[in-house]
Every structure is written in structure tokens, then in C-alpha cells.
């Protein structure tokens, strides 16, 4: 079952404000409080690993897994350098990173570990790991987001990570670092007046949050191309976080969802969401998005509740 | 004080592979060479720069990406290590460089006066991007001149290539005004490739030149069309086809470097000096220079 290898999944924003300036606005503080709640939930779970998929770490040569057992440096954000420096010291699980690479290669992907002194870990990963796992209580790895990868490659990447979790008998919390709508204000703003960039972005974000709240991860995965067209600045080929999250956690809609916070971060949609694999919740979902490997005839939807 | 001026503007691509291939003391990984056509072109340009009197190099880089305006380096000295997040296996470079903060501030103010959103970067922990370091290392390996880096605002994606061009031209003009008022002699550096589709695999030996070629023929044809305009001194036309070029070749021109430089140099109508063209992991890279003083201008290739 999913909950044997995945305790739960988190979706968190990439911008540094909840770490560096939570007091600058009520919204940033609510995001920070939600991060703190998630930190406690990780501490209270028996997870032994955190896997971060960061949309702010692009790669070109396949998929990169952070494997430096002690990743240390002082990072400064490209845009928000005036909010302060971000010193970090993270414990990475180099053995698990290596297992992910092996499994990714078995599934036809180009992949490698990176283990270099002074490697520039990205703002989103630093914010997430600093707030969710401040004492390095459990080790982590970070996986890059390949610039050219589209749906099939991203789905296979998630499956490879599941392979590694299963084989290594690990219990992971997976963390997706990504905005919802990602259009920021391009002029300086007063943080206390921060808001979602447009009504349209806000409407779409709230619709996505409804899906998350209902645990409909696979439905969101299926909606990814629409989301990309509607509320994503076209910086990369596709909106990939839901594909990766679904294939890593399990491609179905059987989750308990909770939106812990939803706030603007310089105009972008910043949400903190928890998804926990579930065995119940039959009745309000169609359960028509199984990741089918063999056709076994028509399904009785009510029998498919406990995916 | 005499009027400052731009003494040379260079298109200086920054694949970290060329620094890796040079094996300088500052870079940790060791190579067996590679990409000689680009490197020898850079050597030739570096030799020319030694004959030109200049005070500072001003670099526009697509690897310092800002969404809230254009930012300028504002700390007098940076000493740190730059590790390329995409190619960490070949680029881990220890740098120690000086910044001309006075001119940086003057350009920031001039751009702001022209209506652009700007900000000075004052955080001493900031890591200078590997694009700046690669272009500057190849053009002046002695690092004996101060530099300034200007970030690339992401207008192309946020708005359109046309908006990017308008803003980059305005930024270039503002920088020129600040340079003239400063009395300094300045080399401009537009740090980027042309066509920019990469291979997503790497050979076991990255410098294995038997594996290196342009990603596809279309990229090559587009690159050559643009370089032909450089040779003919038709920079207005080159900027006019930039949106199409950038879209067709997913070119690194999207950051605005070349447009900014042409804006600062008043859209040259004289031929560029061409120092080389070569692919790096599939992308198209041209080293070219525009030299305002005709007595310093050469036919290189
Ligand atoms: Fe680049």
C-alpha cells in the first residue's frame, strides 16, 4: 500500500518569504505557521526520509539527485537578496539518491547523483528543508526538474522513485516545491498589500485547492496541461509538479487532502497542502483514473475504492 | 573629465565547457581540452583586448534572472566558489573579483530615471553567476579589471519578445548615458549562446569532440542567418528578426543581452568581428565583437 512507503505528501511554495520575512505580512506568517505545522507532523510520523522535487532546480542532463551527505553553503536569492542570506546545512541520503538513479536508469531515464562541495541548492529547496526539517532529524534528497522533460518522462521519474522506496523499504514524506499560479508582480510591492496577481489566477488556484482538498491528485495530474496554459508563465514546457507528485505517491484519487494555507507571495499563488494516502472515501469520486497496466474488463467503480 | 565611451561590445557565450577545457587553476575539474574553435577565438579576442585601453567590463547575463526589475551588482568585491547547478561535473570555479560599484550605481540610477524598475544588489553573500564568470574568464583570464553584472529581467516570458526588446533597448541607452557621464572606457559583454537546444545526455568524457555537433540543422541555419547580418553590419535587421529567431531556436537571446548591447552601442551599422562559431552540447555559440573606432576594427574570420 502507498502509505507503507509514502507517509504523506506536501505541496509548498518556492519563495523565501516564509523563511526570511514571515512577519512582513499576515499572509506570510500564515504560510510560516503552516510550514511549522507540517514540520511537527513530519516529526510525529515515522517517516525516515524526505524527497524534495523542486521546480526551482532546473537540469538539462537528465535528472539529478542531490547526494552530498552534508550540503552546506550560504545561499542568496536572485530576486529577494535584500531579505537576507540563507545559510544551510542539510543531511542528504546519498545511498537513497544512488538507488533512485539506478531505478531511473532501469526505466530508461538519464540520471545522476550530484555530490559536490558548494553546490548551489535552490531557494525553494532551502526554504522547504529549513522549515520542515530544521535539525536534519531525518535525511533528505532533492530531485531536479529537467527543463525538457514532459509528461511521460516525469511520470516515469516518479515511478522510479517509488521503485527505490519499495526496494529500500523506506518511509518517505514527499515534498513538491512549486507555486500554483506563478505570475509575480514585476514592480516592488508593499508586503502587507500582497495579493494574487489577477482574479483569474486566484479563481484557478482556488479550483485546484478544491481538488487537493478532495484528495483528487490523479485528476489534477490529468489537468496539468490545462493548468499550464491558464495560470503558468510559459517559462518551461509544462506544469509538471502534479505529474511527479501523482506518479511518486500513486496515480489515483484516494487521498485525504488538507489545505493548510493559501496566500499570495509577490503575486504568485503560495499554498501549503497535505495529501495522505487513504483507504476509504468512496462515494464522491469517480475512481476512473487508475494507472492501468493490464485490461481486466469493465470495473465496478464501487469495488475500486481501496486502490 | 573627458566623456566616457564604449570601446568594444562582445557577444561572449558562456558554456562552462570552455573554461573546463582550458584547465585554469581556478576550476577544480580537469579536462583533456575540447571546443578549440571557440577557445582559440576567445584567445584572439583576449589578445585584442590587451591592446585596448579600458577601465571596466559590464556584463549582461541570463543566469542572474530577476522578475522584479533589473538588478545591478553593488558590492565592491566577491570572493567565493561558483558551481554550475546544471553541469557541476565540469564547473567548480574559485573566483575573486572586483566590482565598479560607482558605475554600477550610476547605470542603475540612469535606468531608473528612464522609467525602468531597478535595484542594487548589496548582499555580500551573493554568488556571482557562472555566465558572468565564464565570459569574463575567457575575455580577461587575468581578472585585472573590475566588472559589473546586470541581471536579465524575464520580460520575454512574462510579456513578449517585443516587450523585452523595448525594455532592453531602453536599458542599453540608459547604461550608455551613465558610461558617458562617468568618463570611463567600457567593454560591454553580452553573455549568451545563440540557438539554445541542448542534448539531454552527455558522453562519459564531456570533451569527446567526436560527439559534439549542433542539435539540428534548423538551429544551424538560423544561427548562420543571424551571423550573416552581424557580418554585414545590419544590426537593426538582426534585432527585427530577434523574436522569430528566439522562438525558432529557443535561443538564449531571450534574456535580452544582445539587444541591450545594441541599444547601448546605438545599433551599429558596421561589420562585426567574428571570432568563431561552434556547438557546445548541441547549442550554437558565436563569439563576435563590435568596435566603434574604425581604426581598431579588423576582419578576423
Ligand atoms: Fe547559459
Image (cartoon, coloured by chain):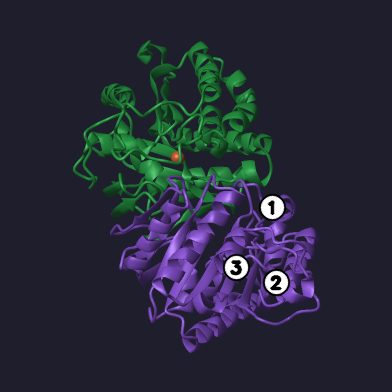
Q: Marks 3/1: CA distance?
A: 22 Å
Apparent side of residue A281 relative to residue B157 in the rendered image (left or right): right
Residue A250: mark? 3
- Which residue shows up at 58% across the image and 37% down it? B168
Q: Which residue is nearer to you in this view: A7 or B145?
A: A7
Can see residue B118?
no
Q: Chain of mark 1?
A: A
- Which residue shows up at 42% across the image and 69% down it? A167
Apparent side of residue A253 relative to residue A73 in the rendered image (left or right): right
Q: Tell me whether circle 3 and circle 2 mark residues in contact (CB < 8 Å).
A: no
- Residue at the spot of label 1: A228
Residue B119: image x %, image y %?
Answer: 53, 53
SS for callout 3: loop
Residue A241: image x %, image y %?
Answer: 60, 60
- Residue at the spot of label 2: A212
Q: Are marks 3 and 2 on the same chain?
A: yes
Residue A163: image x %, image y %?
Answer: 47, 64
Q: Which chain is green?
A: B
SS for callout 1: helix
Q: Which residue is nearer to you in this view: B241 or B222?
A: B222
Amino acid at each position: 500500500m502507498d502509505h507503507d512507503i509514502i507517509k504523506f505528501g506536501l505541496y509548498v511554495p518556492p519563495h523565501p518569504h516564509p523563511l526570511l520575512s514571515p512577519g512582513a505580512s499576515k499572509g506570510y506568517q500564515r504560510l510560516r505557521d503552516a510550514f511549522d505545522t507540517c514540520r511537527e507532523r513530519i516529526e510525529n510520523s515515522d517517516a525516515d526520509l524526505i524527497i524534495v522535487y523542486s521546480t526551482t532546480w532546473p537540469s538539462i542532463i537528465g535528472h539529478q539527485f542531490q547526494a552530498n551527505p552534508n550540503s552546506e553553503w550560504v545561499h542568496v536569492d536572485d530576486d529577494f537578496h535584500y531579505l537576507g542570506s540563507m545559510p544551510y546545512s542539510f543531511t542528504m541520503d546519498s545511498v537513497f539518491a544512488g538507488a533512485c538513479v539506478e531505478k531511473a536508469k532501469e526505466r530508461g531515464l538519464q540520471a545522476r547523483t550530484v555530490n559536490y562541495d558548494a553546490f548551489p541548492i535552490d531557494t525553494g529547496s532551502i526554504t522547504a528543508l529549513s522549515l520542515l526539517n530544521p535539525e536534519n532529524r531525518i535525511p533528505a534528497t532533492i530531485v531536479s526538474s529537467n527543463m525538457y522533460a514532459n509528461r511521460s518522462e516525469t511520470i516515469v521519474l516518479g515511478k522510479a522513485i517509488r521503485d527505490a522506496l519499495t526496494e529500500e523499504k523506506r518511509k518517505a514524506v514527499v515534498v513538491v516545491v512549486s507555486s500554483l499560479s506563478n505570475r509575480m508582480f514585476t514592480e516592488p510591492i508593499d508586503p502587507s498589500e500582497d495579493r494574487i496577481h489577477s482574479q483569474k489566477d486566484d479563481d484557478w488556484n482556488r479550483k485546484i485547492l478544491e481538488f487537493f482538498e478532495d484528495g483528487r491528485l490523479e485528476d489534477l495530474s490529468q489537468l496539468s496541461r490545462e493548468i499550464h496554459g491558464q495560470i503558468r508563465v510559459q517559462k518551461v514546457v509544462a506544469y509538471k509538479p502534479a505529474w511527479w507528485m501523482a506518479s511518486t505517491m500513486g496515480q489515483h484519487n484516494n487521498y485525504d487532502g488538507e489545505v493548510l494555507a493559501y496566500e499570495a507571495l509577490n503575486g504568485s499563488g503560495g499554498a501549503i497542502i497535505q495529501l495522505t494516502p487513504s483507504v476509504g472515501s468512496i462515494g464522491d469520486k469517480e475512481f476512473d483514473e487508475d494507472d492501468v497496466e493490464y485490461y481486466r474488463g469493465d470495473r465496478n467503480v464501487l469495488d475500486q475504492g481501496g486502490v | 573629465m573627458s566623456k566616457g565611451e564604449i570601446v568594444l561590445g562582445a557577444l561572449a557565450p558562456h558554456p562552462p565547457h570552455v573554461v573546463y577545457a582550458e584547465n585554469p587553476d581556478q576550476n577544480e575539474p580537469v579536462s583533456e581540452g575540447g571546443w578549440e574553435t571557440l577557445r582559440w577565438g576567445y584567445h584572439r579576442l583576449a589578445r585584442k583586448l590587451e591592446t585596448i585601453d579600458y577601465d571596466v567590463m559590464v556584463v549582461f547575463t541570463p543566469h542572474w534572472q530577476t522578475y522584479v526589475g533589473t538588478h545591478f551588482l553593488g558590492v565592491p568585491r566577491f570572493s567565493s566558489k561558483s558551481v554550475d547547478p546544471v553541469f557541476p561535473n565540469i564547473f567548480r570555479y574559485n573566483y575573486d573579483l572586483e566590482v565598479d560599484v560607482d558605475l554600477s550605481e550610476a547605470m542603475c540610477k540612469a535606468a531608473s530615471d528612464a522609467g525602468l524598475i531597478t535595484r542594487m544588489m548589496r548582499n555580500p553573500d551573493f554568488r556571482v553567476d557562472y555566465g558572468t564568470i565564464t565570459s569574463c574568464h575567457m575575455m580577461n583570464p587575468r581578472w585585472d579589471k573590475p566588472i559589473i553584472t546586470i541581471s536579465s529581467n524575464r520580460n520575454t516570458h512574462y510579456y513578449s519578445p517585443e516587450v523585452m526588446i523595448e525594455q532592453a533597448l531602453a536599458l542599453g541607452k540608459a547604461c550608455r548615458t551613465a558610461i558617458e557621464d562617468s568618463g570611463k572606457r567600457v567593454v560591454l559583454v553580452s553573455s549568451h549562446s545563440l540557438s539554445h537546444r541542448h542534448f539531454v545526455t552527455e558522453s562519459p568524457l564531456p570533451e569527446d569532440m567526436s560527439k559534439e555537433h549542433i542539435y539540428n540543422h534548423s538551429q544551424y541555419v538560423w544561427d548562420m542567418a543571424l551571423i550573416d547580418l552581424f557580418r554585414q553590419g545590419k544590426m537593426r535587421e538582426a534585432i527585427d528578426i530577434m523574436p522569430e529567431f528566439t522562438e525558432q531556436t529557443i535561443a538564449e537571446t531571450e534574456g535580452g543581452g544582445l539587444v541591450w548591447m545594441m541599444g547601448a552601442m546605438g545599433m551599429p551599422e558596421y561589420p562585426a568581428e567574428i571570432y568563431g562559431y561552434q556547438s557546445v552540447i548541441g547549442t550554437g555559440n558565436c563569439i563576435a565583437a563590435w568596435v566603434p573606432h574604425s581604426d581598431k576594427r579588423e576582419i578576423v574570420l
